[in-house]
Image (spheres, rainbow, N blue to C red):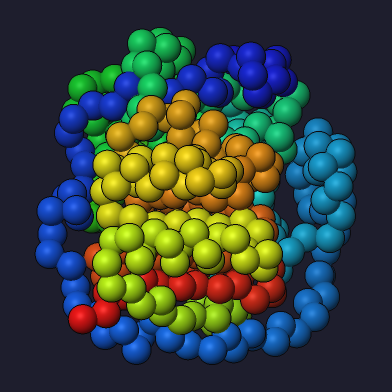
Amino acid sequence: MPYSSRSRTSSRNFTRQPRSFQGGRPTNKSKVKKEYIHPSKFIQVAKPVSINEYTSQHTFDDFKMHDLLKRNLAAKGFKQPSPIQDQTIPVGLDGRDVVGIANTGTGKTAAFAIPMLHRLMSDPQSRALIMAPTRELANQIQDECRSIGRGSGLSATLIIGGTAMGPQLRDLRGRPRVVIGTPGRIKDHLQQGTLDLSQFNIIVLDEFDRMLDMGFIHDIKEILSQAATERQSFFFSATLDARVRGLIADFSDNPVHITVKTGDTSDNVHQDIVTYTTKEDKIEKLHDLLNNEAVTKVLVFDDTKRSVEKLSQELESRGFGSDAIHGGKSQAQRQRALQKFKESRINVLVATDVAARGIDVVGVSHVINYSTPQSYADYTHRIGRAGRAGNTGYALTFIEKY
């Protein structure tokens, strides 16, 4: 179905999602021994990064794109582009490959969506593939693309796990112009023969470094090798390490590098530990923390699906507005819980690490590590959900006292 034909609640092609296949997934990290992290690494005073005022070189009206896109952006209240948008959109509209280094929450989706949608509207033969590390980020990209492209007549489908497969397979048979998904699910479809990427000449990888952290490197290589040889690519990442550089060199053509990252997100987060002696002491200290009036919206991380469910139910029984999100829930359940959290109908979301990647929720004041993360990289991803948009966030990690 086109972007223009239906609202979010009734749209078919752009909102239906598949049942999970079993293959094409990264290693289950819960079975891997945790990296030892000295408690001192969980303690750090926030050091907010001073951001110089950025002066846009363009307005959205300046960009040489379809008037429909300009009208949709104006209706969304977009006037001055963010730094990543200001520098990426004109390069993307020129057809160049782009490597964008920017923090989450800087407007990356519109930075690639605008040139992508313009090209799709200008060339009926063009097709686009967007890859993201998590279901939640894929959903967010879907929403933003739908909003910017409303009325364009472009069709799209979402390829992620946790929902019915039948409607998704039907949508793919209709040859959608845009496919959005996670690497493992896309690879599953390639193996099943239900997706042919040979005509996809626009490729977007969002939060590229996180996909590599999650073990998707081989899936990504296989997927990119099956896309059209002549294509335009957008790579967005918070870091540019050797792995990222190597894949970009292999799968891009003289890309333009755009860097607007001002520092690590965790610099804006005040970090400390909470010591406990017994399970009872631990839950009582969490209870007291959540009762603090400064804790307005909080993500609580625990290790397993079972422990997350149990903890969320315990907090509900104590009178807190709480829900749980983890890989064992259907996509519809995860989306409902996330939406309640975004809309502040609940103020506590208990999660496994699935929520640390790709979730952009405004106003998270605290991240609480009820269990320690698997690695320091996971810790950084967790606490990065707080301290956004220049605000100071807080991260507390529970450490057993011997």
The residue shown at (33%, 73%) is 276
The residue shown at (50%, 41%) is 316
Is the C terminus in the top left, top right, bottom left or bottom right quadrant?
bottom left
Residue 170 is situated, as x and y percent measured from the top left of the image, at 40, 10
On the image, which quarter does residue 310 sit in? top left
Q: Visible in this render: residue 304? A: yes
Left or right of residue 172, residue 236 in this image:
right
Q: Is residue 72 above or below residue 20?
A: below
On the image, which quarter does residue 268 sit in? bottom right
Q: Using the image as rendered, state which of residue 147 and residue 244 is in the foreground.
A: 147
Q: Using the image as rendered, state which of residue 350 and residue 13 is in the foreground.
A: 350
Residue 14 is situated, as x and y percent measured from the top left of the image, at 55, 23
Is the N terminus in the top left, top right, bottom left or bottom right quadrant?
top right
On the image, which quarter does residue 152 sit in? top right
Q: Is residue 356 above or below residue 199?
A: below
Q: Is residue 312 above or below residue 56?
A: above
Residue 275 is situated, as x and y percent measured from the top left of the image, at 36, 77
The residue shown at (35%, 66%) is 281
